Image (cartoon, rainbow, N blue to C red):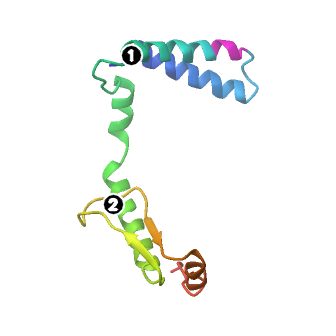
């Protein structure tokens, strides 16, 4: 499990990197050494069971996960319905209706046929 100090070190490295990339922090070696140190800590504990750091747990509590899941499912359903009209496409669906995929996987019989058929379909509203 990453300690708060390890998490803080990684966050500091990320912030310094962002400043460096904007030209506001001159010491590239400094933030790279912080990343290296944080990575060594992770390597040292690689065989131990991992848990989220306190920082990540705090961030996760404020994310609207259920809203994101609902929107992903709506997006998938909309896209699958529209693409399902194209001859020669097979949409791979989740095993259960309430499962929320991160992507819409499509199998194509023939790329040429799919492109020709898709020109007739509007994905717009």
Which residue is label 1 attached to? 4
Which residue is label 2 attached to? 70
Image coordinates of residue 113 in percent, x first then y, are: 57, 82
Real-space CA distance between mark 2 and mark 1, rounded to the nearest whole angstrom: 32 Å
SS type, badge 2: helix
For label 2, count other residues whose C-alpha is less than 10 Å away and answer few (under 14), some (14-19) or many (20+): few
Point out the stretch of residues depicted in magenta. 27-31
Q: Nearer the viewer, residue 7 or 122?
A: 122
Extreme bottom residue here?
A: 120
Q: Nearer the viewer, residue 97 or 59?
A: 97
Image coordinates of residue 100 in percent, x first then y, are: 32, 58
Q: Nearer the viewer, residue 120 or 109?
A: 109
Tell whether 39 sits left or right of 98.
Answer: right
Q: Is residue 36 above or below residue 92?
A: above
For label 1, count other residues whose C-alpha is less than 10 Å away and answer few (under 14), some (14-19) or many (20+): few
Residue at x-position 35% and y-position 63%:
73
Tell whether 18 sits left or right of 106.
Answer: right
Residue at x-position 45% and y-position 68%:
106
SS type, badge 1: helix
Magenta segment, prevailing SS (helix, strand or loop): helix
- Mark 2 and 1 residues: CB-CB less than 8 Å, in contact? no
Q: Earlier in the sequence, mark 2 or mark 1?
A: 1
Q: Is residue 73 above or below residue 25?
A: below
Image coordinates of residue 47 in percent, x first then y, are: 32, 18
Image coordinates of residue 75 in percent, x first then y, are: 42, 66
Q: Give yes or no for residue 118 being in the magenta stretch.
A: no
- Quadrant holding the N terminus: top left
């Amino acid at each position: 499990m990453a300690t708060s100090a390890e998490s803080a070190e990684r966050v500091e490295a990320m912030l310094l990197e962002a400043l460096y990339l904007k030209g506001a922090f001159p010491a590239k070696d400094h933030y790279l050494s912080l990343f290296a140190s944080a990575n060594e800590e992770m390597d040292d504990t690689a065989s131990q069971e991992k848990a989220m750091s306190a920082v990540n747990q705090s961030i996760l509590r404020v994310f609207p996960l259920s809203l994101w899941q609902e929107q992903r499912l709506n997006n998938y359903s909309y896209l699958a319905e529209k693409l399902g009209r194209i001859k020669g496409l097979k949409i791979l669906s989740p095993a259960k209706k309430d499962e929320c995929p991160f992507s819409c996987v499509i199998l194509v019989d023939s790329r040429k046929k799919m492109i020709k058929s898709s020109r007739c379909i509007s994905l717009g509203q």
